[in-house]
Image (cartoon, grey):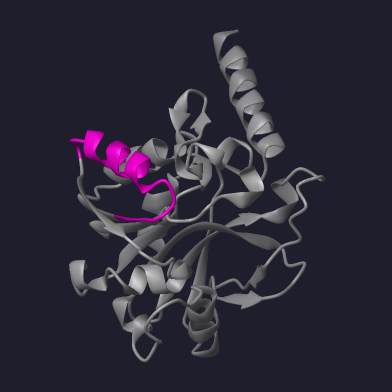
Amino acid sequence: MPTQAVILAAGFGKRMRPLTETCPKPLLKVDGRSILDRIFDALVEAGVRDVIVNTHYLADQVEACCHNRKDLNIRTSYETDILETGGGVKNVLQYIDNKPFYVLNGDVIWQDFSTHVPALQGLAAAWDPEKTDLLLMVYPREKLPEDSGLKGDYEMDDAGRLQHKIGGSYVFAGPRIVSPALFDNTPDGAFSFLDLFHKAQDAGRLYGFAHQGAWHHAGTPEDLAAINENYRNAHKMTAT
């Protein structure tokens, strides 16, 4: 199982304004707890010890949250100019052992249920270094609310291999495991992690793990309000 992770937390969260005018998106609260702390909790449960968090926008707040965690070894990496998702990860490879590692978006929200394998542990169990360079957590599009606005990104065959398709049966859900070798011959500076998705797919080495718990897309303040309402309703059902 991977013991290291990179969390992407440098972005401006523009679609989440005005909430992000004074608070970075990873520190917005879901059921009273920041998204970033929820990600840290999941990493601890998955056996991860070393985490690197890239920062830029309102970096001091993100760094303070990282400093408060005593159950993980967390290093922050400030970007003077945002390096985008691919460049941001490549920029911290010097701190990563030459082994597969988790990459997570700092605004991803999911729930693990006792009846299913937890997301990060499921990813780790599905990782096969003999055939995989990039393993994505995906979520069945049919489980999303009809008004989610998400159209689907991938089809997945019986072996778990992914093929990009607009309107596909699965949406990319954020968490992933990546081999450091996938960054070979990539540019320095800013570039999108999507370039690596395409690179792995072209080599037949892009695979998926379908998360069976809950997954939430938090793009706007309205989305976040709906997610918090979902959590409140879940608490009410548990109480009864």
Residue ID at (63%, 43%): 16
Left or right: where 72 falls relative to 144:
left
Q: Is residue 214 above or below residue 98?
A: above
Nearest the eye: 233 or 222: 222
Give the residue furthest to the right: 146
Residue 46, image x, y percentages: 30, 47
Q: Position of residue 97 (x, y in %)?
A: 18, 70
The magenta stretch spans residue 32: no
Note whether 228 is above or below 115 in the view shown.
Answer: above
State the extent of the magenta-drawn residues as a range. 53-71
On the image, which quarter does residue 4 sit in?
bottom left
Check the image and name the residue furthest to the top: 240
- Residue 141 location in percent, x, y? 71, 55
Q: Position of residue 33 (x, y in %)?
A: 44, 28
Horizontally, residue 109 falls left or right of residue 65, namely: right
| Residue sitting at x 35%, y 63% | 79
Decide if residue 59 is in sight here: yes
Q: Taking 74 as reference, is 204 left or right?
A: right
The residue lying at 42 percent from left, 53 percent from top is 9
